[in-house]
Image: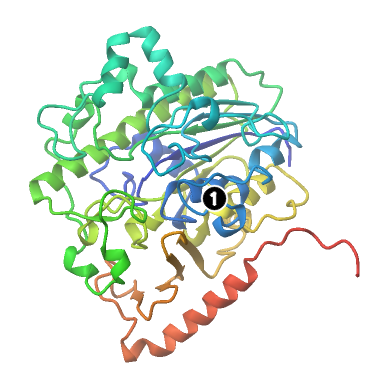
Amino acid sequence: MSSKKHIWLITTDQMRGDALGYENPAVITPNLDGLAREGMVFNRAYCASPVCTPSRASIFTGRYPHIHGAWNIGVSLNEDELTLCDHLKQSGYYTIGVGKMHFREQCKTGFTYEAEEVSVRDRGRERDGTYYGFDEHHISEDNMIGEYLDEIGERDPDVAGRLRKDLFRSDDAAGDVWESGLPPELHQTRWISDRSIRAIEEHSPEQPLFLWSSFVDPHHPFNPPEAYSRLYEHTEIPEPAGDASDVKGRPEHLLLQKGSYWPGGGELHSWDQQHMERLIRNYYAMITFIDEEIGRILGAWKDKGMDDELLIVFTSDHGELLGDHGLLYKGPWFYEGLTRIPMILKGPGVKKGAKTDALMEHVDIVPTLLELIGKAEIPEGIQGISQRPVASGETERVRESAMTAYDAHDRGVHAKCLRTDRYKLVIFADEAYGELFDLESDPDELHNRFFDPSYLEMKHKLMETLVHRLMRDQDPLPVRKAFW
């Protein structure tokens, strides 16, 4: 295989696996649907963690959160970790990241909501001055400060001022839901695509390019530009799975969701059906805006003549509870809407027009890409498994299970989730309680079988599998180089 394939990684933030048109007809995503038709869809891809930083770090290191150090939001990725960019640069790639990175804290220390200084948040790592291996990084995180807001301030000071003030919050806003008056051409989503397009246009096709286009949406607040909200005015919205009664009996520390993000979100809500329909419509509208911008960036690859040997990966850091089981946002929960993520692969070596139920994890992205560009050996320390044999159609699966973890050990929360083809097991450290769902007979996860005698043998088998996984998934570094 040639090592000159360009690579385009596209990520969203907080996007469910069922929030794409090819799976959910209510969502308008023609460009992503096109990528799915031309590549392979992994129907059962799962996040490393149901919060941002751990999953993003796992996507880029191929290592689990308890190994790479970024075990929750508010914790930075260890600068000693080798990333996908580091590995690609060894093969001659130029690496550019645009949009949300979130490898470091966005807030200052001391558990304050005061934004961290951009010079600190986006600084280069000590050993080589790069941002975790990126030759260029153009960052705009949730709070928008940095290049995006600086540029908007130069183009339209009034818009920048309004963004700083209230994010164009409308008079009829309810909670985190409103339709924004921000012009689409000045929106953060458009800036990320514009900056990605500029990176492509300015790059020499002779050198392989790795581009990460990382969209901040559809993360809450659910506030798309009005034009995109109107696309969904008459859309019939599917009802969330289950209701608030589904979480009764959870460990007490998971029911005490006082204020946002203690200990990671996943808040019970009391909004009525009308509000939830507005919220979900706006969530879909944000995705449609992103899809439109993905189409623009894809056009830039084609115009530059760099699309023939282009490897594309589309995914998200985690999903969104979106009202399922009476919950919103993310956090220490493991329902499908939160842990199952979109995953599309397209390009040389990937079977076209295919869908697979093979289990996949975030940590598999690094080894899969490295094998697809022809790297002879996967670097030591990577814990993921290459999905290239599945992507090429050579084999049906390389995994028997997928694992998701939530750790907040400073708050006394440790949880591990094991997903197999049929079952989902969730174990909470130091708790007698757990969860076991039979997803074949109960796809909406309404009936917990953890204490069901008829599932006792299966529970024990899954627990044994999880123990073996945890034993295998310790850090393989440093590599042993001598007998003794």
Q: Position of residue 479 (x, y in %)?
A: 79, 59
Q: Is residue 236 visible?
A: no
Can you say which quadrant of the picture contains the C terminus? bottom right
Quadrant that contains the N terminus: top right
* Image-based side of 461 in relation to 211, left or right: left
Residue 373 % position (x, y): 69, 42
- Position of 119 relative to 100 (above/below): above
The answer to whether residue 171 is visible is yes
Q: How many marks?
A: 1
- Quadrant of the rendered image containing residue 326: bottom left
Q: Does 373 sit above or below residue 424?
A: above
Label 1 sits on residue: 70
Q: Which residue lies furthest to the right in this view?
A: 483
Residue at position x 33%, y 62% in the image = 335
| Residue 317 position within the rendered picture, expressed as x and y whole percent measured from the top left | 45, 47
In the image, 4 versus 381, the foreground residue is 381
Residue at the image point whose x is 33% and y is 17% from the top = 186
Residue 12 on image: x %, y %: 41, 39
- SS class of the residue under badge 1? loop
**Neighbour tally class for label 1: few under 14, some 14-19, many 20 plus, Cα within 10 Å:** many
Could you tell me the amino acid type at mark 1? Ala
